[in-house]
């Protein structure tokens, strides 16, 4: 009578067979099995590690700056963070958007090209309601076409987004970005042929524990033309070099235009809490400085000059009499 094997015995038998087959494969191959990495020829890795780090830094700066702007406009905390950078075909990006969508076409200059900024319709509706003073219930599942009035209201926000895009790209190139049109159907937005690759930057927008996405779609051809310049390649490989004389002159000129707080004190004193509570109009406080005695002048809370406090015509003024030298200690 044939014996019926239990489940444990069957598992043990199968494990033994798999171990024997793996040993045979290693013997026939003359060594341990090599690690095989799959490569998809339809989605080749077109972006180098240096370019990937550059895109990460640029869009992390955009997320921080645009998040601060939205927080100020909506009077609530809006968190934006970089989620992913993907390489797709343009047709795959278009198919991933379910109509009705909210797509803004940005026209770039230097180099010329077009980029798509995609927002969730629920986020757009929420922003419009908050800008009008409503409570605004943000749900990522909200999906309806954006009206012409809502598009006009959102134009200010999107123009600021385009301005931030140009600002964050400025360390790489002096880019100019303008919003040229709005589309709700992704099939009507054909900035490049469907078979060409694109780089999609996904940013996560978080408001009151509700999350949604906003995406940038850059044609790879445009990115390749931008980072292909010798100056940009040098920055990516070796970083920013020493500043030129012209750059130093520009920075020095801007620094000289900056305002700095200067504060002069007539004198100082200390009183008890009881005396402070008992102060009345007309009471006198004796200071530790004498008339015509030099006083300390502070620049950004740092003692910098000595001077005499007086009047110049109808204004109070300070006559600089000495410069306070910094004491440097040399360590042996």
Image (cartoon, rainbow, N blue to C red):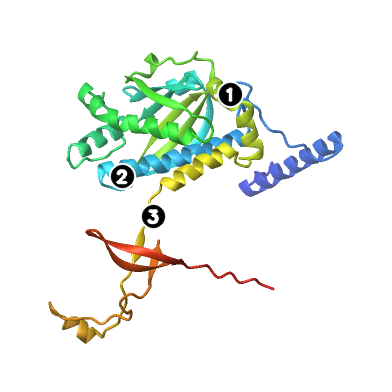
Which residue is tagged 1? 224
Mark 2 residue element: helix
Q: Residue 116's spot in the image, x, y percent?
A: 42, 24
Point 58% across, 69% down: residue: 328
Point 37% across, 39% down: residue: 66
> How far is the residue under mark 3 from the one under mark 2?
29 Å
Q: Which of marks 2 and 1 is nearer the N terminus?
A: 2
* Whether residue 223 is situated above or below residue 64 in the rendered picture: above
Q: Residues within 10 Å of mark 2 (few under 14, many from 20)?
A: some
Front residue of 207/313: it is 313
Specify whether 267 is left or right of 55.
left
Specify whether 49 is left or right of 181.
right
> How far is the residue under mark 3 from the one under mark 1?
44 Å
Which residue is tagged 3? 260
Front residue of 8/176: it is 176
Mark 3 residue element: loop
Classify the position of the N terminus by image quarter.
top right
Asked whether the viewer can see residue 40, the reply is yes
Q: Earlier in the sequence, mark 3 or mark 2?
A: 2
Classify the position of the C terminus by image quarter.
bottom right
Which residue is tagged 2? 71
Q: Name which quarter of the figure residue 156 lies in.
A: top left
Point 63% across, 40% down: residue: 241
User: Which mark is nearer the camera, 3 or 1?
Assistant: 3
Front residue of 179/127: it is 179
Q: Residue 89's spot in the image, x, y percent?
A: 52, 21
Point 25% across, 46% down: residue: 75
Q: Which of marks 3 and 1 is nearer the N terminus?
A: 1
């Amino acid at each position: 009578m044939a014996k019926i094997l239990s489940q444990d015995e069957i598992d043990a038998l199968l494990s033994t067979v798999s171990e024997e087959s793996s040993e045979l494969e290693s013997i026939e191959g003359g060594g341990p099995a090599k690690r095989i990495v799959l490569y998809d020829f339809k989605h080749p890795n077109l972006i180098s590690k240096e370019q990937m780090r550059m895109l990460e830094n640029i869009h992390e700066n955009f997320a921080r700056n645009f998040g601060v702007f939205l927080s100020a406009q909506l009077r609530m905390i809006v968190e934006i963070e970089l989620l992913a950078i993907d390489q797709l075909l343009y047709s795959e990006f278009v198919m991933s958007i379910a109509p009705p969508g909210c797509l803004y076409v940005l026209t770039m200059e230097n180099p010329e090209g077009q980029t798509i900024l995609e927002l969730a319709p629920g986020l757009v509706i929420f922003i419009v309601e908050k800008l009008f003073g409503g409570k605004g219930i943000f749900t990522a599942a909200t999906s309806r076409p954006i009206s012409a009035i809502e598009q006009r209201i959102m134009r200010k926000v999107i123009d600021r987004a385009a301005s931030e895009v140009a600002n964050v790209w400025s360390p790489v190139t002096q880019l100019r970005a303008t919003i040229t049109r709005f589309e709700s159907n992704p099939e009507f937005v054909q900035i490049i042929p469907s078979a060409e690759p694109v780089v999609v930057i996904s940013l996560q927008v978080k408001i009151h524990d509700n999350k949604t996405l906003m995406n940038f779609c850059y044609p790879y051809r445009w990115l390749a033309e931008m980072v292909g310049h010798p100056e940009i390649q040098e920055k990516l490989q070796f970083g920013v070099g020493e500043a030129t004389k012209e750059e130093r002159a520009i920075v020095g000129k801007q620094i000289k235009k900056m305002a700095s707080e200067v504060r002069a004190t007539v004198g100082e004193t200390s009183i008890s809490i009881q005396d402070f509570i008992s102060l009345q109009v007309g009471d006198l406080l004796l200071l530790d400085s004498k008339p015509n005695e030099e006083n300390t002048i502070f620049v950004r809370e740092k003692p910098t000059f000595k001077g005499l406090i007086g009047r110049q015509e109808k204004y109070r003024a300070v006559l600089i009499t000495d410069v306070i030298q910094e004491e440097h200690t040399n360590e042996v």
